[in-house]
């Protein structure tokens, strides 16, 4: 396998009608689905796709966090190019970038995602070295200044509602697919925040199975809009929405 194959993967597509919302633009959850599919396509080219890794080594990748910086969401039928490349690792986490470009080369959406390697059955975290037999173990280390920003969601946020977990939300690992959390976050953002947010980060804390219900707590804090989802076992996810590059977001009084 050549270094070029590992270094970057690119795909072109037109935004389909079922992935756009009322403003005729790509929905946030749909953007996360495109990210997930683009990653899987690249892993397939690298011969470490979901089925092969599970069959050969009993391993799967779990997404830990996703940060999306939005210039603008592409329109229905707009031709876009998505490019992805693995950046390296930070501890047990693998860092990967995704960038959505318009036809004129304009950067539309910039995504950073972290994943970990896990046992397919027990879901216990495995060391990155377990990838070495596949010939793609990343030796590059992502510096602390380039890693995903950590944030905390304070207790006491207002209760915003519940989101049941349905069978159609599940993925091949048997729990709510990570991209569906993008739908949940979008659904529970106030309209003013949904319209003006330029950076959204989701941290995936624990799996949520079918039949469970996410209890959503959300509110303003420190210039950002924060959210926490709790399942039967505790915190399932946390999320933040903010202005450009994580800056303060204009939040009107309730």
Image (cartoon, grey):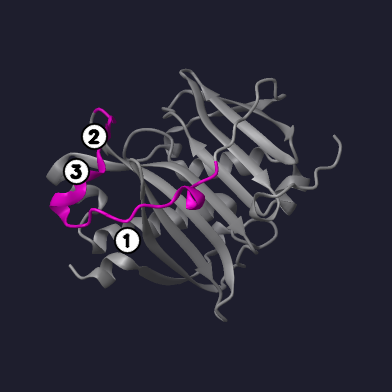
1 or 3: tag closer to the N-terminus: 1
2 or 3: tag closer to the N-terminus: 2
Task: Report whether 24 appears left or right of 105.
Answer: right
Q: Report the disc number at residue 41.
A: 1
- In percent of width and height, residue 144 lies at 47, 47
> What residue is at 70 percent from the left and 24 percent from the top?
157
Range drawn in magenta: 122-149
Inter-mark Cα distance, 2 to 3: 10 Å
For the residue pair 121 and 27, the one nearer the viewer reads as: 121
Frontmost of labels 1 and 3 is: 3
Task: Report whether 139 appears left or right of 13.
Answer: left
Q: Secondary structure at mark 2?
A: strand
Q: Report the disc number at residue 119.
A: 2
Q: Quadrant of the N terminus?
A: bottom left
Q: Secondary structure at mark 1?
A: helix
- In percent of width and height, residue 238 lies at 56, 33
- In percent of width and height, residue 224 lies at 71, 41
- In percent of width and height, residue 16 lies at 52, 65
For the residue pair 27 and 81, the one nearer the viewer reads as: 81
1 or 2: tag closer to the N-terminus: 1
Q: Quadrant of the C terminus?
A: top right
| Mark 2 touches mark 3? (CB < 8 Å) | no
> What residue is at 40 percent from the left and 55 percent from the top?
96
Q: Secondary structure at mark 3?
A: helix
> What residue is at 45 percent from the left and 38 percent from the top?
169
Residue named by callout 3: 130
Q: Quadrant of residue 23?
A: bottom right
User: Relative to residue 58, is residue 113 depicted above or below?
Assistant: below
User: Relative to residue 164, is residue 71 depicted above or below?
Assistant: below
């Amino acid at each position: 396998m050549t270094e070029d194959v590992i270094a970057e993967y690119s795909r072109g597509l037109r935004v389909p009608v079922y992935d756009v919302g009322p403003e005729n633009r790509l929905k946030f959850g749909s953007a996360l689905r495109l990210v997930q599919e683009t990653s899987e396509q690249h892993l397939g080219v690298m011969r470490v796709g979901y089925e092969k890794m599970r069959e050969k080594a009993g391993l799967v990748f779990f997404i830990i966090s996703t940060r999306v910086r939005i210039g603008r969401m592409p329109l229905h039928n707009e031709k876009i190019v998505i490019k992805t490349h693995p950046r390296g690792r930070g501890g047990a986490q693998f860092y990967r970038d995704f960038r959505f470009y318009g036809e004129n080369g304009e950067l539309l959406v910039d995504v950073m995602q972290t994943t970990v390697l896990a046992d397919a059955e027990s879901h216990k975290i495995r060391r990155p070295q377990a990838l070495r037999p596949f010939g793609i173990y990343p030796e590059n280390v992502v510096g602390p200044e380039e890693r995903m920003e950590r944030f905390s969601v304070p207790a006491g946020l207002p209760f915003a509602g519940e989101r049941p977990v349905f069978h159609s939300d599940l993925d091949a690992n048997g729990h709510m697919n990570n991209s569906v959390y993008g739908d949940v976050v979008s659904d529970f953002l106030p309209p003013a925040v949904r319209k003006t947010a330029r950076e959204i980060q989701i941290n995936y804390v624990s799996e949520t199975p079918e039949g469970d219900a996410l209890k959503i707590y959300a509110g303003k804090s420190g210039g950002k809009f924060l959210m926490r989802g709790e399942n039967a076992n505790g915190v399932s996810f946390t999320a933040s929405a903010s202005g450009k590059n994580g800056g303060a977001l204009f939040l009107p009084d309730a």
